Amino acid sequence: IDIRNSQPLMFAIKLKEHSNPYTYTSLYYSGAQTSHRELEPDVELYIRLVEQGELYDYLMEKFNYRNRRHFKTKFFAEIFYSELSKSSRLAKQFESLFPSVFHVIVHEKKGNYCRLPLEMQKIEADIMIGNVGGRLAREGIPFLTIHDSILTMEEYVPVVKKFIREAFAEYGLTPTLN
């Protein structure tokens, strides 16, 4: 069982941390006049796309990329996993579609660009190994973890999917599972 758009989904958890109205960084729509504040439209779109497992497809279409594997490699290299280059065409394109999201990426990388990918990997490990894996082990369900995926026997697939969905629900997210 694989989580679609896994690393961008892990970053959505970081976005939600920044969206807390009690923190110094707020991604809530500044024009909201009610007590129920709304997220900035680009943050809402990003979260919806990663939950639906469609972020890569959306970006590839917007930026006119055809090769998914090449695009994902370039996306991770230039957006999440390395120092941001203001001259990067992909970074500029991403920022134009998701300015608030990009702002959080820049903020998270300030001082040490390695911190963000490490935090995203830690979130993934906490969810997939600590939460889901721990529950599966307590239930006696055989499984192996492979990054954002869990390998199990066919008869246990519904339970594994349920546990994954419940783990992400704790963060207010609904992943798409393959």
Image (cartoon, helix red, strand yellow):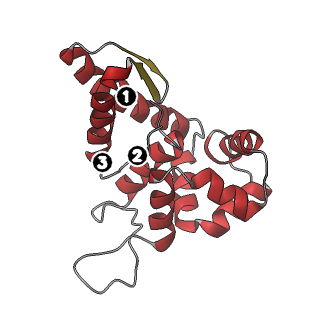
Q: Residue at x 69, y 46 (%)?
A: 75
Near mark 2 (Cα within 10 A), the count class, few <14, some 14-19 or many ≥20, is many
Q: Say what amino acid the circle numbered 1 marks.
A: Met
Q: Position of residue 81 (x, y in %)?
A: 63, 39
Q: Residue at x 38, y 21 (%)?
A: 154
Q: Say what amino acid the circle numbered 2 marks.
A: Pro
Near mark 3 (Cα within 10 A), the count class, few <14, some 14-19 or many ≥20, is some
Q: Is residue 129 above or below residue 91?
A: above
Q: Position of residue 168 (x, y in %)?
A: 32, 43
- Helix, strand or loop at label 2? It is loop
From the viewer's side, name the closer residue of 4 and 93.
Answer: 4
Instruction: Give the Cα separation between the discs numbered 1 and 2.
Output: 12 Å
Label at residue 171 = 3
Q: Position of residue 4 (x, y in %)?
A: 51, 42
Q: Residue at x 40, y 27 (%)?
A: 125
Q: Is residue 79 above or below residue 138?
A: below
Near mark 1 (Cα within 10 A), the count class, few <14, some 14-19 or many ≥20, is many
Residue that label 2 marks:
175
Position of 57 with respect to 11 (left or right) is right
Residue that label 1 marks:
128
